[in-house]
Image (tube, rainbow, N blue to C red):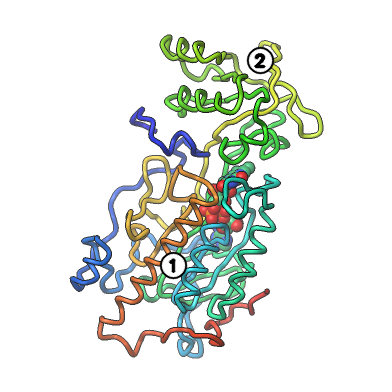
Amino acid sequence: MSSGKVDGESLVAGVVPPVVTTRSGEGEAGNGDVSRRDFLQAGALLGAAIVAPGCATASGTALRPTNTSERSVPPYDVVIVGGGPGGLAAALTLGRSRKRVLLCDSGSRRNAAAEHIHNFVTRDGTSPEEFRRIGRGQLAAYPSVNVQEVRVVSVSGARDAFQIGLTSGTAQSRRVLLCTGMIDERLPIEGFDELWGHAIFQCPYCHGWEVQDRRWGYLVSASDAQMLLPFALQARGWTREVVVFTSGTFDVPAETRARLRAAGISVETDPVRRFISRERHLEAVELSTGAIVPCDVVFTHPAQRQVELVRSLGLTLDEHGYVRTDATRSETSIPGVYAAGDLTTRMQGAIWAAAAGARAGAMINVDLAMDLASGRLGEIAQPAGPGVSAPLTNVPSPDR
Ligand SMILES: Cc1cc2nc3c(=O)[nH]c(=O)nc-3n(C[C@H](O)[C@H](O)[C@H](O)COP(=O)(O)OP(=O)(O)OC[C@H]3O[C@@H](n4cnc5c(N)ncnc54)[C@H](O)[C@@H]3O)c2cc1C
């Protein structure tokens, strides 16, 4: 956060330092009809297919050309990349809108280390595996939604005619929705890996209740300096015992120290050497001086990075490395490519990602509907109703 301003997102986010180079330049604005502009409350329209800037293959290799038989297969309306809460919710919205959807999900989940998802109404305490199982099970009711355990390795082409490179096959799609989440960097401190998601957390709303009234540590880095006071004071709502660890990465102003002291919060400035634990239970934090600070749980916000596919696309990012999207439409700087969930924001949580996915799905549906007035009706796939299979090129059959 370069401004030094603490916003609502910063207080609850599981994120922080900018880790990816910011790129400038918004996507191209098209021209189009007035009703659509009114509906979307946005001046930029998604007009004629424009070759997406920087829309390259992740591997650097060209996509296999589309052969004649594939061309006869109608494209997907939307390929969703990522099947976490964001992607699942988007697929549900689009499936219920009778759109042909390919949901591709592969790789580890962001919350893989966590045993339960909390703070998601109706799903509080559900395991991440169960959450996905339920989500995919509900999608099975919508025959136009095809869920695949497959990784998307490239996206090329342009709005209305994207080529999606998969680890097994290719697909064509009119729109792309990125719900790829973020990758948390591991802190190079002994004991961090085994405790992450068990005694080291990023979000008190997700895990604070379970460790209320325990001894909390807050490990804060220089890039989070402006979060120190509000986050530490916030932590006091869950416990009286809060220790801040700065590892000497920045100076804590005297006024901040005084306010922390007034709230009963102590500050340790020596570097953290290791986390002392037994069977994934944190017992203490050891400092470089050899001092041992008893602690049951530590909150911290490791740096994050985008997944390789997103990095390869050349999308405009914000100053923190998150994909910049139009606030109303969820569209990125590349026309026809949308994004929702953790990859777009510091405000990270399963229910927020799901809400963003549902909204992006609805906005994509509106965008697709606007094509009906483009005079290209013959080129546009008809809605998929009950019993209509999703179009496949050489993508494997749904596994569900
Ligand atoms: C330890 C931990 C515990 C947490 N606990 C909670 C909690 O209790 N409550 C809560 O609300 N939030 C919690 N969170 C945050 C929550 O997990 C995220 O906010 C949420 O999962 C974000 O959803 P998403 O759909 O944006 O991304 P994700 O859930 O990260 O899903 C993205 C998916 O996309 C896949 N993917 C990425 N690239 C590709 C590709 N190229 N091709 C195909 N698939 C791809 C990934 O493998 C992944 O499955 C926790 C986070 C962590 C780190």
Please give left or right for residue 95 compared with residue 134 in the image.
left
Residue indicated by mark 2? 288
The residue carrying mark 1 is 176
Disc number lying in front (1 or 2): 1
Q: Which of marks 1 and 2 is nearer the N terminus?
A: 1
Residue drawn where x is 47% and y is 12% of the image: 257
Q: In which quarter of the image is residue 338?
A: bottom left
> Can the viewer see residue 307 in this picture?
no
Quadrant (top left, top right, bottom left, bottom right) of the C terminus = bottom right
The answer to whether residue 33 is above or below residue 280 is: below
User: Quick check: 184 above or below 123?
Assistant: above
Q: Give yes or no for contact between labels 1 and 2 (Cβ–Cβ under 8 Å).
A: no
Nearer the observer, 14 or 307: 14
Residue 316 to residue 51: above or below = above
**Residue 101 x/y as whole percent:** 50, 74
Q: Which residue is drawn at 50% across and 60% down?
A: 58
Circle 1: residue type:
Val
Q: Can residue 217 be seen in this view?
A: yes
Instruction: Give the side of residue 70 with respect to residue 201, left or right.
Output: left
Name the amino acid, label 2: Ser
- Whether residue 153 sits left or right of residue 332 in the image: it is right
**Where residue 352 sits in the image (x, y, percent)?**
48, 51
Q: Nearer the viewer, residue 370 or 161?
A: 370
Tell me: residue 190, above or below residue 339.
Answer: above
Q: Name the secondary structure under disc 1.
A: strand
Say the numbered circle drawn on residue 327.
none
